[in-house]
Image: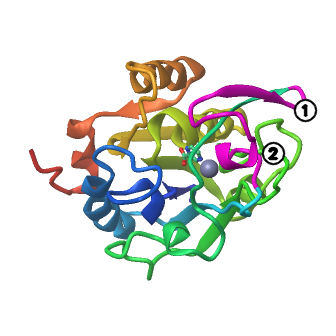
Amino acid sequence: MPKKALIMVDLQNDFCQGGSLAVPGADEIISLANQLQPRFDLVIATKDWHPQDHTSFASNHPGHSVGDLIMINGISQILWQDHCVQKTYGAAFHPQLNTQLIKKIFYKGTDKNIDSYSAFFDNAHRRATGLSDYLKEAQVEDVYIMGLATDYCVKYSSLDAVQQGFNVFVMIGACRGVDLHPGDSTKAIYDMQTAGAHILQTNDYNQFNISMGS
Ligand code: VGL
Ligand code: ZN
C-alpha cells in the first residue's frame, strides 16, 4: 500500500512568537500539527539548523542589513536575523509541539556557505538531505506539507517534492508566511499550484476528521 507522510516544516521557536524571525500567526498552527500527526503513516519533521557563522545571517555581512538581497557564490541570498542557531532554544521545537510521533528529523542549512530553504536540497540543488530517498524507501507516494514559512521553506520543499515525483498536498491552512513583501505567500501558493502541488484549503481537511477551528 502506498503510504502518506506528513512533513512538518520548521516548527521552531525562532519562527514563533517571541522568536528572532517570528512568522505572524505561527503559534496557531502548532495544535493543528498535533491533531494531524496521528492521521498519517509516517511523520517527518524538519529543522532549520544553522551554525552561528551562517552565510544567511546579516550579522555575518558587515555593512548589510536584514532583508538585503546579495549574491553569494552566484546564488542570490536574502539576509536574515540570526535564527535557528544549532542547539539553541530558538532552534528547538515549539514547546507545545507533540514530538512523540516524529519518526525522523531532517536538518537543513547546516553548511555555513549555503542556505537551504527546501527540506530536500540546498539552494543550489547540489546536496540532498536524504529526505527523498528516505520517503521512497518507506513506500511513501503522498506527501502532505505544513509549517513555516509558506513563502520560503514550505514553498521550496513542495516544489522539490513535486520534482522528486511525489503527489504533493500543501495544507495551506496549517502554514504561515513571512511576507517580507506583501503578497509573497499568495505568490508562493500560486507557484506551488502551477508546479503541480495540490493546495488543500480548510474544507479539504475533512478527510482527516479534524476541525480546523474558525
Ligand atoms: C526559513 C527564512 C530563513 C523558513 C528559514 O523556514 O521558511 N525562512 N530560514
Ligand atoms: Zn534559515
Quadrant of the rendered structure where residue 170 is? top left
Q: Is residue 187 visible?
A: yes
Q: How is the image coloured?
A: rainbow
Name which of mark 2 and mark 1 comes first in the sequence.
1
Q: CA distance from mark 2 to mark 1?
A: 9 Å
Compared to residue 143, the image places residue 169 above or below, namely above
Report the amino acid beneath label 1.
Asn
Q: Residue at x 57, y 56 (%)?
A: 83
Q: Which residues are magenta?
A: 54-74
Q: Residue at x 26, y 64 (%)?
A: 31
What main secondary structure does the magenta stretch of the protein show?
Answer: loop
- Furthest residue in direction bottom, as rendered: 100
Residues tagged 2 and 1 counted as in contact (Cβ below 8 A)? yes
Quadrant of the rendered structure where residue 164 is? top right
Report the amino acid beneath label 2.
Ile
The residue beneath circle 1 is: 73
Q: Is residue 11 visible?
A: no
